Amino acid sequence: QVQLVESGGGLVQPGGSLRLSCAASGSIFSIYAMGWYRQAPGKQRELVADITRGGSTSYAESVKGRFTISRDNAKNTVYLQMNSLKPEDTAVYSCKIVYRSNWGSISDYWGQGTQVTVSS
């Protein structure tokens, strides 16, 4: 079994910052990619940022220069530092991992999501 525990969401004013964390545990041998996605009301889920085990990153154009993704492989944890937040960043943010289980299979797994609301 795999568990993903997300934290760090909340209410913040425009221009503010938040840091999301997602810690993975369970029957995980190795995690390949880790990423953050978001879904705003009435919109499709979109990729915000992802990071490989080696540290290569990619970002949605709308967050480049404002958000930074990082990971701690020893802790199986991925972070998303969000600065200069805008009201349009309001969404449910979910983490996703692509991992190899202890039995050798490769799968992906989603977290439950954490709400981020940017409003004055």
Image (cartoon, helix red, strand yellow):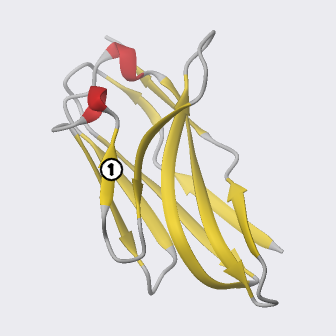
**Image height check: is 118 above or below 94?**
above
Identify the image quadrant of residue 23: bottom right
Total numbered labels placed on residues in the image: 1
Residue picked out by circle 1: 58
Q: What residue is at 34 percent from the left and 35 percent from the top?
A: 60
The quarter in which the C terminus is drawn is: top left
Q: Is residue 28 left or right of residue 20?
A: right
- Relative to the observer, which residue lies in front, 107 or 22? 107
Residue flagged by tag 1: what amino acid is it?
Ser
The quarter in which the N terminus is drawn is: bottom right
The percent position of residue 97, horizontal first and vertical second, equals 60, 62
Q: What residue is at 61 percent from the left and 13 percent from the top?
A: 41
Q: Secondary structure at mark 1?
A: strand
- Crowdedness near tag 1: few (<14), some (14–19) or many (≥20) residues, C-alpha within 10 Å: some
Q: What residue is at 55 percent from the left and 19 percent from the top?
A: 40
The percent position of residue 10, horizontal first and vertical second, equals 46, 34
Q: Is residue 40 left or right of residue 58?
A: right
Identify the image quadrant of residue 44: top right
Q: What residue is at 37 percent from the left and 15 percent from the top?
A: 88
Q: Is residue 1 left or right of residue 6?
A: right
The percent position of residue 75, horizontal first and vertical second, equals 48, 81
The percent position of residue 45, horizontal first and vertical second, equals 59, 28
Q: Is residue 116 left or right of residue 111?
A: left
